[in-house]
Amino acid sequence: MSVVQEQMPTPLFFSESAVAKVRELVEEEENPGLKLRVFVTGGGCSGFQYGFSFDDSQDEDDTAIEKDGATLLVDPMSYQYLVGATIDYQEGLQGSQFVVQNPNASSTCGCGSSFSI
């Protein structure tokens, strides 16, 4: 008789390019405690807006996703809007930036940093 263990679905996905960029920036800052925080705020042309910052402290109610030596933090309010999303790092004609690919967003704006549910 085998026991099937259910794993909780990964709340957010952290792309290889985002992980590599976080590790690179942490090394440049020479602070191994830095983590990438992604958050959602009201505003932007579509109603909600994504934000990114580096944080060396983690609140006890933050969700932390670790991958290959990089850590992503999400606060409880933002978490509900980001379940199933992918945090990526893209380099293109508009510059280099962290981006959120969010399947929960019903519409996004042209800049890609704001969305609606």
Image: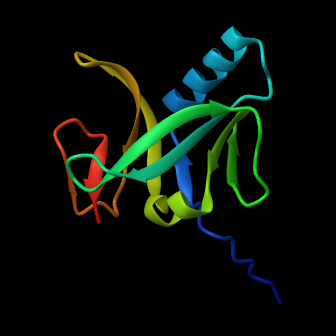
In the displayed structure image, the side of residue 105 where residue 38 appears, left or right? right
The x and y percentages for residue 4 are 74, 81
Residue at 22% across, 53% down = 46
Is 93 or 77 nearer to us in this picture? 77
Furthest residue toward bottom:
1
Is 7 or 55 nearer to us in this picture? 55
The x and y percentages for residue 68 are 70, 34
The x and y percentages for residue 55 are 68, 34
Query: Where 70 sits versus 95, above or below?
Result: below
Furthest residue toward right:
1
Is 98 or 45 nearer to us in this picture? 45
Is 2 or 49 nearer to us in this picture? 49
Task: Using the rendered view, name the quadrant where residue 71 is placed.
Answer: top right
In the displayed structure image, the side of residue 49 where residue 47 appears, left or right? left
Residue at 70% across, 50% down = 64
Q: Quadrant of the C terminus?
A: bottom left
